[in-house]
Amino acid sequence: EVQLQQSGAELVKPGASVKLSCTASGFNIKDTYMHWVKQRPEQGLEWIGRIDPANGNTKYDPKFQGKATITADTSSNTAYLQLSSLTSEDTAVYYCARYGYGFDYWGQGTTLTVSS
Amino acid sequence: DIQMTQSPASLSASVGETVTITCRASGNIHNYLAWYQQKQGKSPQLLVYNAKTLADGVPSRFSGSGSGTQYSLKINSLQPEDFGSYYCQHFWSTPPFTFGSGTKLEIK
C-alpha cells in the first residue's frame, strides 16, 4: 500500500529554520518526482517545488526560491522540505505529494506555526 | 510560466443538481490538467488527470473535459459527500505546476 507519512506539527520562532520530512512506503521515491505544496489557513493550494530523487535535481516556484530547499534521502525513502528565515507568512499546512499523472498520493500534511 | 484562472470561486447547489467548474490556462497546456477535491481538514484527493481520465475509485458522476486553454469539471447528480473545495492544476512542460485558486462547493 502506498503511503506518505509526514513529520509532526512544528511551532517555531520567527527567523528560525525548520526541516519537514515525508517518508514513503509502498513505492521507491527514486521512481518518481516528489513535490511539496503549501496551504495557508482558509486559502488555496500553492505548488512549492519538486525533486527528482534519482539525481537530486530540483525545481521551485520563483516565489519560494531562497525560502524553500527540497532534498531527498533514497536510503530512507524520504523527501525533505527545509524552510528558512521563517515569518508569519510561512504559517501553513505543508503537504508532500507523489507525481503519478497528477498527484495521486498525498501526505497527511504538517502544520507549521511561526510565532514568538 | 502558466497561470490558471478558476471559476467560480464559490458555488451553492442542492443534492441532485449538476454543477460545472472551469479552469482557463494562460497558454496551451495540451490536456496536462488534473482536478482535486479537498474536504475540510483533509489532504486533497486526485479526481481527474490528463483532463479527462478519472482516477481510480472516482465515481462516474464526475467528468473532465476541455482542450487547449479551457477545461471543465462536471459533477452530475450531486451527492452529500461531494461538497468541499475543488482545485485544478496544470502539468504542462516545465514547472511551476500552478494550481487554480479553488472553488468552494456548498450545500444550498
Image (cartoon, coloured by chain):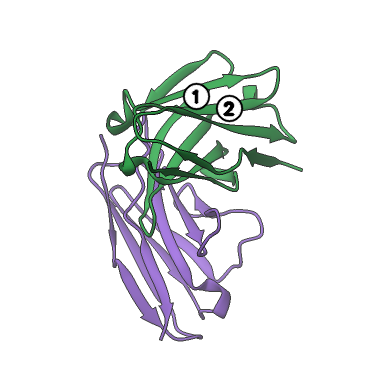
Q: Position of residue A26 (x, y in %)?
A: 75, 36
For the point 36% across and 33% down, the residue is A86
Left/right placement of residue A44 relative to residue A75 reads left
Mark 2 or mark 1: which comes first in sequence?
1
Q: Colour of chain B?
A: purple
Q: Is residue B95 above or below residue A9?
A: above
Front-most of A34 and B67? A34
Q: Secondary structure at mark 1?
A: strand
Q: Colour of chain A?
A: green
* Disc 2: CA contacts within 10 A as few (<14), some (14-19) or many (>=20): many
* Amino acid at circle 1: Ile
Q: Position of residue A81 (x, y in %)?
A: 49, 29
Could you tell me how far apart the alpha carbons at marks 2 and 1 are, in whole angstroms? 8 Å
**Contact flag, marks 2 and 1 (Cβ < 8 Å):** yes
Q: Is residue A30 above or below residue A104?
A: above
For mark 1, what is the residue?
A51
Please say whether residue A110 is visible from this viewpoint. yes
Front-most of B4 and A68? A68
For mark 2, what is the residue?
A79
Q: Nearer the viewer, mark 2 or mark 1?
A: 2
